[in-house]
Image (cartoon, helix red, strand yellow):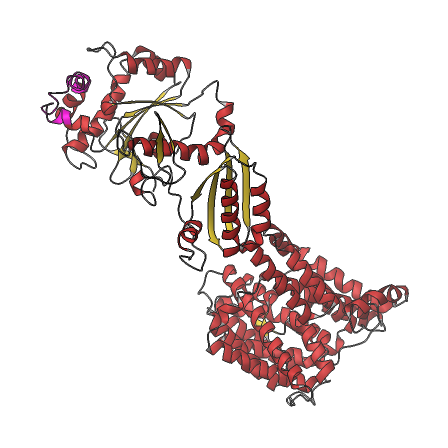
Amino acid sequence: MLRHDLPASLVVFLVAIPLSLGIAVTSGAPLIAGLVAAVVGGLVAGPLGGSVVQVSGPAAGLALVVSELVRTYGWRATCMITLMAGALQVVLGAFKVARTALAVSPAVVHGMLAGVGVVIALSQLHVVLGGQPQRSAVENILELPAQIADNHSHAVAVGVLTIALLVLWPRLPRVNVVPAPLAALSIAALTAGLLGWDVARADLSRGFTDWATPAPPTGDWHGIAGAVLLVALLAGVESLLCCVAADRLQDGPRANLDRELTGQGLANLVSGALGGLPVAGVIVRTTTNVRAGARSRWSATLHGVWVLLFAVCLGWCVTLIPLEALAALLVFIGVRMVNLGTVRGLHGHGELPIYVLTMGAVVVVGLAEGVLLGLGLAALFALRRLTRVSIQVRLEPDDRWHVVVTGSLTFVGVPSLTSSLRAIPAGAAVDLDLNVDFMDNAAFEAVHGWRLEHERGGGTIAIDEIHDQWYTTAAASGTRVSAAKTPPRAPDRWWLPRAYRRGGPLSRIPVRHGQTWVPSREGGDETGPHGGAVPDLLAGTADFQRRTAPLVRPFLNRMARTQEPSHLFITCADSRVVPNLITASGPGDLFTVRNIGNLVPRHGAAPPDDSVVAAIEYATAALNVSTITVCGHSGCGAMAALLCGGENIGALPGLGNWLRHGDHTLARYILSDPAGEDHGPLDRLCRVNVAQQLDNLRTHPSVVRLVDSGRVQLVGLYFDIGAARVHVLDREGFSPVTTCPR
């Protein structure tokens, strides 16, 4: 592992040094505090955290909070707040609440970080220009024109040089192995020293006297408690989100979020006790660590060792760095925190307003207030999505009004619902489809009241609840089945046999009026002259007219005068074989021939059969199909009759005459040997029959010409009903050469 982790730790160390110093500057803390936090992040959070590749240290996202705490309570008290925040994180980790932090909207977190980045960039831009930052972002914006107008030649030169190097260095060949922040600060310091520029220098000695002596904060304990909670939550959420992002960057062990929160808490305990900045997982260092090839915790731990050695042995080097160069680095970091890739992703999910509001509020009002406003807007967006309802009203060609309500029907959607329903003319016939996963009392009262009013005016209403019977239950008993939303269910309409659909046969059973069968509007149980067959069939047509017809009408209208199928599909009349279902085909795709046993009479066969021949001729000559498919199936009754010599069909002379076209199939079966997936004589005969019918097709001269010219392809399919599997058979019909995927 060390052969990967050792070089990765050196790369992360080179990135961590300038970032730690810059964050200490913008936090208003001693420079040594940034290095202390980096050391503790490596030596404590590295081995004890929940991620094997995450690197912790001082985070730019906490800089505004720390700077405000330093102004309010002083540096030593801020160290104590960091210590107490760490203790709170340890407690939260012990109670395993880390996953709860992930419930915070990423739009709020990214908006907060972007707002912090803007504030940092605005404040440090004044330092780059040789001035002093103001107390707020708004003041920094107002003072910026005057600051630009003043002449700060050396400071501006150092800042522009640093930013230019940060932008251009990664694009330079062969030298970009050195991290851009380190190269930019080193070159800026060297240039300022050689040219004798008048710039301010970093001073590492400031803060040594206060280093290890955190002091209890004095003042309003409510404010102090709020500060502890804010530091703990912000550092914790940022670390956990970074941890999740790190998992996406590497293929090693997944992170333990509760352990990560506990490890971050222990790191903040130690950092606060030693006079360091708050510690959190840092995405820049973590990404650098993964890209440098880190495989284990050793990389993050060793990076802390290198920072410690640098602070002890090479701390004097820091005094060579111009403060304007550090400020330019912070300006660059602040601008980079406004991530355009994140903005595009949030825009695609409709969460850009949350991001923009949070960022703007952090800049204008403050960090805590901005986060709270962002959370509030995120909650409103979530409520809107959870209660979203779609209402479609259209007049069908049969002069019936069709209303489809989809989503969660709550009081929020009642105004739109009632407006749509009242637009329907009085006395009209209405089909109301309620495809809702929840209906509250306000929505029920609105629907029920409109229904009673419409029926008193002479109209008729048929209500069909597709998802769950919220309205029916409430109308019958005034109670609810459940107070919670119901989960989505798989579609259970056209492709299921009626006996397997929810509630058995379609709920609206047709009723006979005179000699005409029409769908019942009261859900009665009348039956027709054939028991439930006619009502079920007519209810199915009504269901098609109501649900499917509006969807297929546009393209059926376009193909109303002509058809252009690409396949002639010859299959059995067995009720269990549904060609469009097993081939996922729609209207206009298949020109279908169905008969007993999916037989194709040979050319010139006796007794003659013009029906199948006519279909073949029309499909090939008039419709120009490109494929002729013969599809057999398991358990075929026609093949069973052939296998037993027709002894069971004596009373069915027409069937006996028809099955004579299967004599060649029976002869081929007798001469064949079992092969492939043989599940018994009947199964093998059904497969052999497919191959024989393909040979029968080749006895027709017109088919032979088309096949030889390459215009038509012959295909054999076999549908295993019990397994619901479709096989493409070989030329002999025994073994599947292709098994269609599940």
- Of 271 and 605, the residue lying toward us: 605
Q: Position of residue 539 (x, y in %)?
A: 37, 34
- Of 727 and 592, the residue lying toward us: 592
- Of 546 and 207, the residue lying toward us: 546
For residue 463, side relative to residue 416 (left or right):
left
Q: Residue at x 29, y 25 (%)?
A: 571
Q: Residue at x 33, y 34 (%)?
A: 536
Q: Position of residue 313 (x, y in %)?
A: 65, 82
Q: Quadrant of the C terminus?
A: top left
Determine the residue located farthest toward the right in the rendered image.
150
How many tags in the picture?
0
Instruction: Please say if 470 is above or below 658.
Output: below
Q: Residue at x 54, y 72 (%)?
A: 300
Residue 69 in sight from this viewpoint: yes
Q: Position of residue 83 (x, y in %)?
A: 59, 84
Confirm whether the magenta stretch covers residue 654.
yes
Confirm whether the magenta stretch covers residue 344.
no
For residue 640, side relative to residue 230 (left or right):
left
Considering the whole magenta stretch, tell me its main secondary structure: helix
For residue 332, side relative to residue 104 (left or right):
right
- Of 202 and 507, the residue lying toward us: 507
Instruction: Please say if 656 is above or below 473.
Output: above
Determine the residue located farthest toward the front in the rendered image.
456
Quarter where residue 373 is shown = bottom right
Q: Position of residue 398 (x, y in %)?
A: 49, 28
Determine the residue located farthest toward the top in the rendered image.
604
Query: Residues in magenta?
Result: 641-663
Residue 672 in sight from this viewpoint: no
